[in-house]
Structures are given as structure tokens and as C-alpha cells.
Image (cartoon, rainbow, N blue to C red):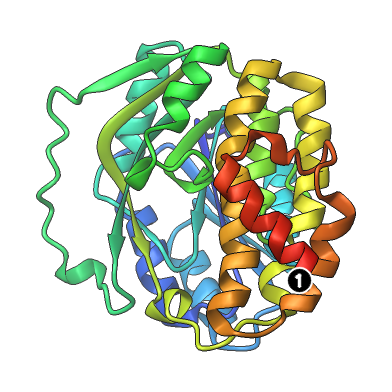
Amino acid sequence: MKKMPEISIIVANYNNAKYLDDCLASVATQSFADFECIIIDDGSADDSKKIINRWLKKDKRFVAYFQKNSGVSAARNRGIDMARGKYIAFLDSDDCFCPGAIGVLYDLIEQNHADIAGGGGVIVDEDFSLSRCPNNINYANMPFQLFSNTVDDMIEMSKMGGQYRFVWVWRRLFRRECIGNVRFDEKLYPGEDTCFMFEIIPHAPRIVESTTMVVYHRFSKNCISRTDFNQEKFAWIVPTLCRLREIMDKYYHPVFQKWFYKGYGLLVLQETVYKSIGFGRMMHQVADMLRPIYGTRVFPTKYLSLRKRLILWLFLKVF
């Protein structure tokens, strides 16, 4: 019988042939070797399949599943269902693990008897290449902090931000049991990572976060300098808010909910009202979308500052 690996690494890929070799090389060269790498190709139309098949022949720890295009959540969920490891990690196919990262996360989660271990994400440009990257990350005497899933610790952990964003699932290692039957919502994108993390945390009473960098996260300049604003850019807001409301009601204390909605409400404003005004278009469509949930429990605007509430109120009145 084939030995169960300690870690299952799930790589969801869609048309990322340009970066896929670097991604898989960063997995294969990890100093921690007891893993399986599950590549889920989500109906790619580029050279991804050739690259994946080459790695399957090269390294027996790699397995693959080719599916019709169904979205990143469906791909990750397929990977979770296939995973055999004690722990599960996620890696986007345009990102790379830092050298030694899996060993770092494994030591953190094992030595601290934790349910989730996390490190940081180094933001790199699109032209980043693993072969040109110096290995200057110091893994000796790694600073780390332990958290529980109490209100105070949740707020403190969420405040880390920056390179340690709460919703980045790919910078973490999860104990298989704490994932259990939780899956990414296949109807959401984006927003699926946020909902997944908030569903997982109640099952993870012991969380360890290290300041050590574990993933090179490729950040496309095209993603942050869009010249367009259309329905796709904000259509995810209401479904995500509805799902988050269900999760918050089920698991979270009102004190944490107040803190969360204060920050997430600002994000909603930025992604809808502010952007539509900034681009000078889609104001009526944004207003029509927000009006039915304005002030409801799905979008509790009472947690926003008076100034933000006034801006939103005027926007809905005008448009």
C-alpha cells in the first residue's frame, strides 16, 4: 500500500503555462520531501497540459486531474477531495514557494500542536523568475506568535494585513481535520477565500503565524491599473455578503461582527461607490445593486463611520 504523505499541496491551474514551470519547480525543490503535489488543471487551453505531463513523468510525487473549466473554487475543492496528507497547503499556479517554506510551515504546525500555520507572502512582479531569485530568507530562530479563535485574538490576527493578509489561503498550512467538510463556495469569485477562511477558523482553536516569508506572490500590474470598470468588477459583492452573513450568524460573536463589518463595509464602498465615481460610469447599476441590501443585516451600514454612511446615502439617493 502506498504510504500516505504528510502534506498534500494543491495547485489549481488555468491557462498559466507561462508561470507553471516555476511554480512546480518551487514545489519539487522543497527541502521537506514528504508531500504529494496535486495539480488540478481547470480546462486550460494553453500549453499547461504538456508542462504538467512533463512533471508527472519527472517526479512521482506529482499527480494531476484535468477537468472542464469550472473555476478556481471547483479546482481547489477537487484537490481537497483527492488529498491524502495529514496537512493541506494551497499554491496558485502563478506563485512560487520560497525555498524551505514547506519545512518551515510543517515545523511550526507540528512543534506548536497547531491547526493552522501561516507565513508571509513576498509580493513580486509579473516578470519574477525563481531561477533569478536569491535565497536570502533566514529560517533560523523564526519569530512566531500563537493565536486562538477567540474574539480578541481574531481581531489581532486580522490586523496583521500587508504580507500576512487574513484571507490568503496559499500562505498557510492547514491540518486536514480543521478543513473537514468545509469547501470553497463555487458560486463566489472573488470572495471565496474570505468565506473559506471564516468557515475554517472556528474549527482551528490553535493558530501559529510567523513573520517568515513562505510564498512569492506574483502581482500583475494589469490587476491594479485597470482602465475599465464593469459589472464583473462588483457583481461578486452581494453574493459574498450574503454568504458571510450566514457564516457570521453561525459562528461569530457580535463584538467580532461589529469589528469585521466596519472594515468590510469600507471595502464594499471602495469596490463599488468609490470606483464607479472614479471611473465615471456604472453609478446607476451600482446603486441598484446596493439599494436592496442597504442597512440590512447583509450589509449593516450602522458600523460605518458617519461620513461613510452619508456618502453611501447620498449616492443611493442621487443614482
Which residue in the protein does label 1 denote? 318
Above or below: residue 199 compared with residue 44: above
* Residue 208 seen in the current view: yes
Q: How many marks?
A: 1
Above or below: residue 151 compared with residue 235: above
Residue 172 x, y percent position in the rendering: 46, 37
Q: Residue at x 49, y 51 (%)?
A: 61
Residue 268 x, y percent position in the rendering: 64, 54
Above or below: residue 44 compared with residue 169: below
Q: Residue 270: which quarter of the image? A: bottom right
User: What is the residue that sits farthest to the right in this orientation?
Assistant: 292
Above or below: residue 270 compared with residue 125: above
**Viewed as shown, does residue 92 lie left or right of 252?**
left
Q: Nearer the viewer, residue 137 or 269?
A: 269
What kind of residue is marked 1?
Val
Residue 287 x, y percent position in the rendering: 78, 67
Instruction: Determine whether the residue tagged by mark 1 lies in a helix, strand or loop.
Output: helix
**Viewed as shown, does residue 137 lie left or right of 286?**
left
Q: Residue at x 75, y 20 (%)?
A: 251
Quadrant in which the N terminus appears: top right
Q: Residue 109: which quarter of the image? A: top left
Category of crowding for the residue at label 1, using alpha-carbon neighbours closer than 10 angstroms: few (below 14), some (14–19), many (at least 20): few
Q: Nearer the viewer, residue 153 or 254?
A: 254
Q: Residue at x 53, y 77 (%)?
A: 278
Residue 118 x, y percent position in the rendering: 40, 33
Q: Residue at x 55, y 74 (%)?
A: 53
**Viewed as shown, does residue 195 lie left or right of 130?**
right
* Residue 2 seen in the current view: no
Quadrant in which the C terminus appears: bottom right
